[in-house]
Amino acid sequence: MKKNRSSQPAITLPGAHQVDARAKRALLRRRVEPIDFDRVSTVAELVEAMRGASVQARNLGRCAEVLRNLYADRRRPTVMLGLAGPLIAAGLRKIIRDLVARGYVDVIVSTGAILYQDIYQARGFGHFHGDPAADDGRLRELFIDRIYDTYVDEEKFIATDTWLGYVADELPPGNYSSRAYLDFVGSKLDDEQSIVHTAHRLGVPMFAPALNDSSIGIGLTHHYHRARLAGRPRLAIDSIRDNYELTQIVVQSPETAAIYIAGGVPKNYINDSVVMSYIFEAEKGHSYALQLTADNPHWGGLSGSTLQEAVSWGKIQNRATTAMCLIEPSVSFPLLAGYALERKLAKGRPRLQFDWHEDELRAIRRRPARRN
């Protein structure tokens, strides 16, 4: 039989009499709460239970708390979703599409690769299970491209590249923001599960600030080459116009919120749009920010930099509600999105209508949420 601990003689640690008992009780106030599957039966309940756990589980729970506060805010912050990494290859396409369709996202800032791979699927092509230990020389012979453990068809990629170039042929020659071009591409797709098509249909601006550094850029290079050979004017993507347009969204929004999935150019672009607000004689900073990433801050790169570091730049308000979870997004993003969708955090939230005149944002208006 185990003896009652209270019957054992007490051992006093050296210096214990000098301990501030009140401060100690304050720090030992809340116990770590075990995740209990007798009480957890849904994704939302699991994510909420993580809030009482520790390490990255707790951080994911904190991200969920940021989302809950964000979508309950009556000031209706403009939500900017930054997307980087192999999210479409990872199978997260429908999650992103559903967040857009159900009113959780007001602006998309993405790598060109993510939007390209959405377009590739919208044209009927697929991603396939692969092997990270595959013979890549053999894959090259078969025109199969590998994204870690995922395969895509290089021949279908080339077909999609050239299709995008021919879509550019349909626009009047001149300089375009990535937003203007991608919106036109979305009008040419008929896949209701497409992110690009859904964003076009609902008027959600899409920016890809490094568009040329993607297969979309390859398609536009094909357009450029054919136009040059024919001696006719051509379309060009104006990346500074991207800056100008997105900064206007920041300036004209009462509040802004940033959701960074991974990091990269989209994270910096969303942040720099805040810094650039001084051009319009405004001073802004995100009211809410959360990030899911596998990058670490101690390398000094932006992708892993803490949200607190962004405060020093004025990118995030000093008193903003923030959370950062260091879990690879193919795991963490479905959990967080599942929480938001299951709890219907954006239910009844009015959509935004952006009134563009070329590169000028004349107004941002609220309109009733549409059922999707």
Image (tube, rainbow, N blue to C red):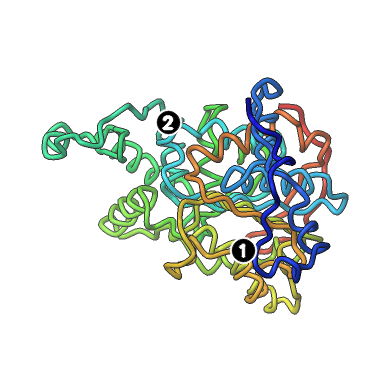
Q: Is residue 129 left or right of residue 275?
A: left
Based on the displayed image, in which of its 4 quarters is residue 361 positioned? Answer: bottom right
Residue 15 or 250: which is nearer the viewer?
15
Question: Where is residue 272 shown, x and y percent of the image?
Answer: 59, 69
- Quadrant containing the N terminus is top right
Of callouts 1 and 2, which one flags the residue occurring earlier in the amino acid sequence? 2
- Label annotation for residue 307: 1
Question: At x 32% / y 33%, what residue is drawn?
Answer: 150
Q: Is residue 217 visible?
A: yes
Residue at disc 2, secondary structure: helix
Identify the secondary structure beneath mark 1.
helix
Disc 1 to disc 2: CB gap under 8 Å: no
Which quadrant holds the C terminus?
A: top right
Asked whether, in this view, residue 81 is left or right of residue 371, the answer is left
Q: Residue at x 60, y 61 (%)?
A: 270
Give the Cα separation between the discs numbered 1 and 2. 34 Å
Q: Nearer the viewer, mark 1 or mark 2?
A: 1
How busy is the neighbourhood of tag 2: few (under 14 within 10 Å), some, or many (20 plus)?
A: some
Query: The residue under label 2 is which amino acid type?
Result: Gln
Q: Quadrant of residue 71?
A: top right
Q: Which residue is mark 2?
A: 121
Tell me the residue at 44%/59% (across/down): 210
Whether residue 197 appears in this view of the structure is: no
Amino acid on which disc 1 is placed: Leu
Snapshot quadrant of residue 200: top right
